Image (cartoon, rainbow, N blue to C red):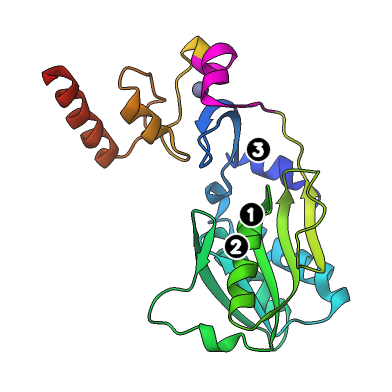
Amino acid sequence: MTKSIEQFLEENGGILRDTHVVFTSGKHATEYFNIRKVAHIADWWKVIGQRLSSMSASIGRPDIIIGAVTLGQTLVDYVAPNIPGVFSTWCNVKDHVASFPPNLEFEPLFKNRTVGIYDDLITSGGSIAAVRDLVVEHGGIVVSASAIVRRDQTVTEIEGIPKIFWLEDIKSRGHVFTPEKCLADGPCSRNQPMIGRPGHGHEFKLKNLDYPMVEGTLTAEDLLTIAEATDRAIEA
Ligand SMILES: [Zn+2]
C-alpha cells in the first residue's frame, strides 16, 4: 500500500472536513471520520487485515479475535484468514456498554481463552474498553487491542490490555465544541448547515427545528419525525 490510510480515506469520503456534526457525546465538531464509506472496498480491507495481523503476530496467536459491530466486526472478518486456527466473533456496543447478541450463545467461548480485540478507530479507547469488560466478565484473557487508526495521540494504553496496536495516527485537523461554545464561536454561530447523519445532528434538529441541515443527510423517517414536531410547535 503506497498511499497512506489518511489519503485513502480522504479520497473516498471517509473523512468529512470543514463540516458540522454532532458526536454521540453531544459535542459539535468540524471533522468526522466515517469509515463506513469505505466498508465496501474489499481489497483495501484485505491489505488492512494482513497488516494488522502481522503487526500483532509478535505477541503470539490469540485463541479468539472479537470486533464490535459494525466496523470492528468487518475488520475481524479480514484479519481472521491471516491467523490460522483463530476463532472470530463479534459483539454489540451501545452507550459504552458491550453485549453479545441474544440467542447466539457466544459467552461460553471465552473462559480461559486469550482474546484480541479489533476496532476501526481508537478515539478515547472507550469502545475497546467496553469489549474488554465483556470478555473479562466471561472469563476471557485480553492480550491485545488493534485498530486501523488512532485519532487521539494521548491514548497510549488501555487499562487491562497488555498491548495495543494501530496502523496509522491521523491527527485531528478539526475543532470540537460544547454545544454552548459552538453557538458562541463555532459553526452554530454562523448557522453553518449541520449533517443529520452520520452523527446525531438529526437529534439536534428535533430540538432546534429552524436550524439548517445539509441536504440529503436526514432519512425519510427523520424528516417525518421533524415534520410532526414542527406541527406540534406551531399548534403550541
Ligand atoms: Zn454546532
The reply, left or right, for residue 105 in relation to residue 184 is: left
Residue at the image position 51 percent from the left and 11 percent from the top: 189
Real-space CA distance between mark 3 and mark 1, rounded to the nearest whole angstrom: 25 Å
Seen in the picture, residue 210 relative to 68 is either above or below; the reply is: above
Q: Amino acid at mark 2?
A: Ala
- Residue 126 is tagged as 1
- Residue 10 is tagged as 3
Residue 207: in magenta span: no
- Residue 130 is tagged as 2
Residue 63 screen position, x and y as percent: 70, 85
Which residue is at the far left?
A: 235
What is the magenta segment's predominant secondary structure? helix
Name the one closer to the observer, 234 or 8: 234
Asked if the residues shown at circle 2 and circle 1 are in contact, with their CB atoms under 8 angstroms apart, the answer is: yes
Q: Nearer the viewer, mark 3 or mark 1?
A: 1
- Picture quadrant where residue 41 is located: bottom right
Real-space CA distance between mark 2 and mark 1, rounded to the nearest whole angstrom: 6 Å
Name the one closer to the observer, 118 or 186: 186
Q: Is mark 1 within 8 Å of ligand 1?
A: no
The numbered mark, 3 or 2, whose residue comes first in the sequence reads 3
